[in-house]
Amino acid sequence: MKIREIRAMRGPNYWSIRRHKLIVMVLDLGDLEQKPTNKIPGFLDRLRALFPGMYEHRCSKGCAGGFFMRVEEGTWMGHVVEHIALEIQTLADMDVGFGRTRTYGEEGVYFVVFNYIEEKVGRYAAKAAVRIAEALIAGEEYDLESDIQEMREIREREALGPSTASLVREAQSRGIPWLRLNRYSLCQLGHGANQKRIQATVTSQTSSIGVELACDKEDTKDLLEKSEIPVPKGDVIKTERGLREVIEDIGFPIVIKPINGNHGRGITTNIDNLDDALVAFHEAKKVSRSIIIERYITGSDYRLLVINYQLVAAALRTPAAVTGDGQSTIQELIDEVNKDPRRGYGHEKVLTEIKVDEMTKKILKEEELELNSILETGRTLHLKDTANLSTGGTAEDVTDVVHPYNVFLAERIAKIIGLDICGIDIMTTDITKPLTETGGAVLEVNAAPGFRMHLAPTKGLPRNVASHVIDMLYPHGQDARIPIVAVTGTNGKTTTTRLIAHIAGSNRKKVGYTTSDGVYIQDRLTMEGDCTGPASAEFVLRDPTVDFAVLESARGGLLRAGLGFKKCDVGIVTNVAADHLGLKGIHTLEQLAKVKGVIPETVMPGGYAILNAEDDLVFGMYRNVQEGVNLAFFALDENNPRIQRQMKRGDLSAVYENGFITILKGEWKIRVAKAVDVPITFDGRATFMIQNVLAAVLAAYTQGFRVPDIRTALKTFIPSPSQTPGRLNLFDFNEFQVLLDYAHNPAGFRALKKLVDKMEGSPKIGIVAGIGDRRQEDNENIGRIAAEMFDEVIIRQDKHLRGKTEEELIAMILKGVHDIDPNKKVTVIPSEKEALTYAISNATKGSLIVVSSDVVPDALNLVMQFKEEETQRLQEKIEAV
């Protein structure tokens, strides 16, 4: 078997609108296409032995053991690989269950699709599943445990921490979108101008001074002491001499900790002699140059969590420990504790496995014990100095019993330090009594406190502390989203995107938009190239200046990784025509329509799916929109039966009637503008542009823009290199005209022909090219349409041949031309620059040169250079006279 490609979907996609996290593997079975599972001796037995848990895979049979039935009957290896990939992730404690195996459109080649929790784990699972299947086929031993452990370790490295993940989950539950901004814990909640940022449990609203204070234990202690907050007696030292001096002053027992440590690193507690103090001092020195020495306060360790200056949770923390039974060794007791299903590797579960580390060995030595020592019945042995959950500690929720004075104290401390989210560590014998009565003390104030102990305590009531953070960041009524208009289709999507952005910008919106030419923030080009994929969409949605997004979404990005957003307010599909067929497993118009149909399917309830009523495949997309989504249709013919039905229902549509761009609200007509007054329509002659205008006008109207403002914007949207680069850019030379357009498929050429037929130039010269990643029939059709459209055809070559040779592409266009007119004048000039230069240099009076370009900036610059040179020559003649 050969893996051709592995893609990771991260948003709504061709395979699923709801399941965003999918691995899509293109797998070539090779000779195994002729060997279904029932023709491989012993395969089922070996599969059952390695994966007994697969009995739960119901598969198409719909019952337990269903997948094994399929294997016994005979299924193909791609299907088996899908189930292995799901099962090994589940064995690594990442429970997944969605999978599909479908033909790629080539014999023996399949799409193997399955969901993942962590992308890198999913990619690993895809490759491992193929290795495992090959071992099972060959009857070879396979080290499955090694793969499972590797996947656990990848997850631990790549996954968000439990605190950050809880905030993301809470945001998602409220419909708040989010983006991960780096490979660590920096995340963005919301979009554009309405975004907030979190990093672990620090937010974009958290005071940097407060964080700095909390990280400096000396300053924190000083501030609290001055505010009459009980803190342990102690001092900050840097040398062994200083250590001895402080011990002489405060006596034993003591605590030694680094001044700027966290997560319990370098902390040693309950030290009662100088030798141990010296060892602890040097441990703390590994973390920080300055060391805090404090009197050890007896009692229990409590964490009080304050969010938005209110106490929301409290937990009693206990260090990792085992209790003897008089028979088991300490190691056996640790192993037994680690069997608790709530314990796992790192942060994968609510509790962490207890590991024997240097701290554990030190404690055992002090207690004169070894790992093989048998602990007497009932004796509890703490295995760590600190009660952190990350080292195997446990937590008990005590929120409801904290004394009101201690609540007051915690909330006052948060204000003193200036932290909107903080964890306050208190040592006291009884949290139900005031700290002043028990002789307890505040040990630390922590910025970015962990939430895990409160979200899933070992004992007591779980607390949804993340909800308090989201309440603080987004108070009731505050929106986290910005309007998103998504545009797709075979042709017209870039112009439609630009026009909507122009209308919104003209109405004082700060617009970010993506196109096949680049990404624009407030009409400034910030990224060049074809930017119609998910990364470009996220680029716009990350920008804190943007309050309105218009996102062109093309086939390529949708198939490569899905959408860069989960929901949109408006989804537009302009049309579906033959283009890029035969690529990425998409072979038919119906499949292409399914790809484009992802856009209207992601429109959120209350939003609008705007569909072309004159395109059967586009119109049919209305069947798959979510419940609660409004439908709006557009058509050039107001008598279109689909538009008539829409009118009778009282719903929204847009038509071209009596020369007007008109919105239909039920049967009421709202005439927006005459087409001849809208420059992009070329005096109403460019009907394909009128379609784009209709879609854009509907989008603007649904977003609350006033009709007079829409009309003004339409009249100021000029087909020019600045506003619509490469889309019907007409240059008037002294004796001829040059029209530059991006038409690049048969449907685009047919639409262009309708306009060119109405233009007066003669002769009409076309500069066209074959496209390497299109089907032969598509390139030949371009040649046929060119032969019908032009008096002379100049064949050039695209900058990127995309898999075919120059000779092959020229031959395809020539065949198409000669199918229509064997005597048509054809000139072959492979270089676009040379072809343009030839056409302009040889242009006759009254001629029209039409250029179909793939690298628009290069062609535009060359035409504008010729135009400038002509203007300069005319100016010199005038000056000479």
Image: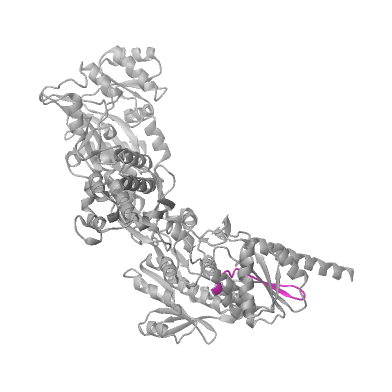
> In the image, is residue 736 part of the stretch drawn in magenta?
yes
Q: How did the renderer colour the structure?
A: one colour
Quarter of the figure with the C terminus: bottom right
Q: Is residue 218 visible?
A: yes
Corner quadrant of residue 314: top left
Q: Residue furthest right?
A: 881
Q: Residue at x 29, y 23 (%)?
A: 359
Q: In the image, is 303 to the left or to the right of 595?
A: left
Corner quadrant of residue 20: bottom left
Vertical relation: 310 (above or below) 858: above
**Residue 657 locus on image (x, y percent):** 50, 85
Q: Identify which residue, 288 or 159, lies in the foreground.
A: 159
**Residue 29 locus on image (x, y percent):** 39, 54
> In the image, is residue 524 part of the stretch drawn in magenta?
no
Q: Identify which residue, 872 or 726, lies in the foreground.
A: 726
**Residue 789 locus on image (x, y percent):** 64, 79
Q: Residue at x 85, y 67 (%)?
A: 876
Q: In the image, is 109 to the left or to the right of 806?
A: left
Corner quadrant of residue 755: bottom right
Q: Identify which residue, 402 or 123, lies in the foreground.
A: 123
Q: In the image, is 672 to the left or to the right of 794?
A: left
Q: How many marks?
A: 0
Which range is magenta? 730-746
Vertical relation: 755 (above or below) 92: below
**Residue 696 locus on image (x, y percent):** 49, 72
Q: Identify which residue, 574 or 107, lies in the foreground.
A: 107
Q: Residue at x 36, y 58 (%)?
A: 34
